[in-house]
Image: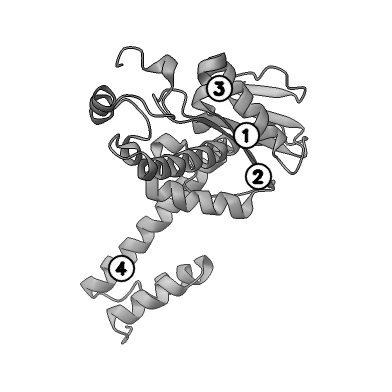
Amino acid sequence: MSKESIKEIDSRLKMAEDAEREQLMKVYAPDDRAGVQKLLEKYRKQKEKLLAEKERLAKMRQYEEKYADHAFICGIDEVGRGPLAGPVVAGAVILPKECEILYINDSKKLSAAKRDELYDEIMDKAVAVGLGMASPARIDEINILQATYEAMRQAIDNLKVEPDLLLNDAVTIPEVVIPQVPIIKGDAKSASIAAASIVAKVTRDRMMVEYDSALPGYGFASNKGYGSAEHIEALKKYGPTPIHRASFITHFV
């Protein structure tokens, strides 16, 4: 039986690599102290969760695997089609082959803290990242759909590596010669699209926080330009700001 303290055992298990941890768990298995058994159960559950996450990630690479003969597969997604204020932002991300980013998912399914964490990992691991955006004035000028396409084309153009296949969240982008694969709910089905979704979301959210400092009273830091009760009330009270979309707020001003 181990004479190590439970704290010491926990430290060893925590610091060990996967293979070593497996061996240590076998060594400590005969230790009948309740605290040790509780520790072992905790690490067993962690392993199960990790395996489940890796299986989920494998499913999220189904399109990347299907088109593996392409050298540079790029995921495309946008954020901000629905808000009353702020730009629409598009992200384009090329991930390395066999890239594994744990917990990557549709940005809407992630907490703000997890998005920030994944954003840093994506920016660190990606072969290339491109961003594009269309201003509120541009949205009013050409409509939100055309502005979204324009932002997506900008994002592609801003990549430092030219992709040879685009995986798009639902849409086919006009005026793009690169082959495209539109995928319904693609940000939950493709790691590349999910990465683009996260990059676009974090970029736009940070912009809206900055706008909140410059244009206080509308709650942009929390509502990100969407039509919350607080936002609509402020819009009626103070009127529109330069970042409001005139074509979106006709019912409120």
**Residue 204 in the figure: left or right of residue 209:** right
Separation (CA) of disc 1 from disc 3:
24 Å
Mark 2, secondary structure of its residue: loop
Q: Amino acid at mark 1?
A: Gly
Farthest residue, direction top: 251
Q: Identify whether 15 is placed above or below 42.
A: below
Give the Cα separation between the discs numbered 1 and 2.
8 Å
- Do residues under tags 4 and 3 come within 8 Å of each other at their CB atoms? no
Q: Residues within 10 Å of mark 2 (few under 14, many from 20)?
A: many
Q: Is residue 184 visible?
A: no
Q: Is residue 102 left or right of residue 12?
A: right
Q: Quadrant of residue 145?
A: top right
Seen from the viewer's position, the closer of residues 21 and 98 is: 98
Check disc 1: other Cα within 10 Å, few if <14, some if 14-19, many if 20+.
Answer: many
Ranked by sequence position, the earlier of labels 1 and 3 is 1
Q: Nearer the viewer, mark 3 or mark 2?
A: 3
In this rendered view, identify the residue nearer to me: 154 or 65: 154
Per the image, the residue denoted by label 3 is 138
Q: Nearer the viewer, residue 139 or 156?
A: 139
Residue flagged by tag 4: what amino acid is it?
A: Leu
Q: Of the residues shown, which amino acid type is indicated by label 3?
A: Arg
Spatial distance from mark 4 to mark 1, Cα to Cα? 40 Å
Sequence order check, earlier mark of 1 and 2: 1
Q: Which residue is mark 1?
A: 75
**First along the sequence among labels 4 and 3:** 4
Name the residue carrying label 2: 95
Q: Are marks 1 and 2 in contact (CB under 8 Å)?
A: yes
Whether 13 is drawn above or below 97: the answer is below
Query: Eyeballing the image, is 1 above or below 39?
Result: below
137 left or right of 64 in image:
left
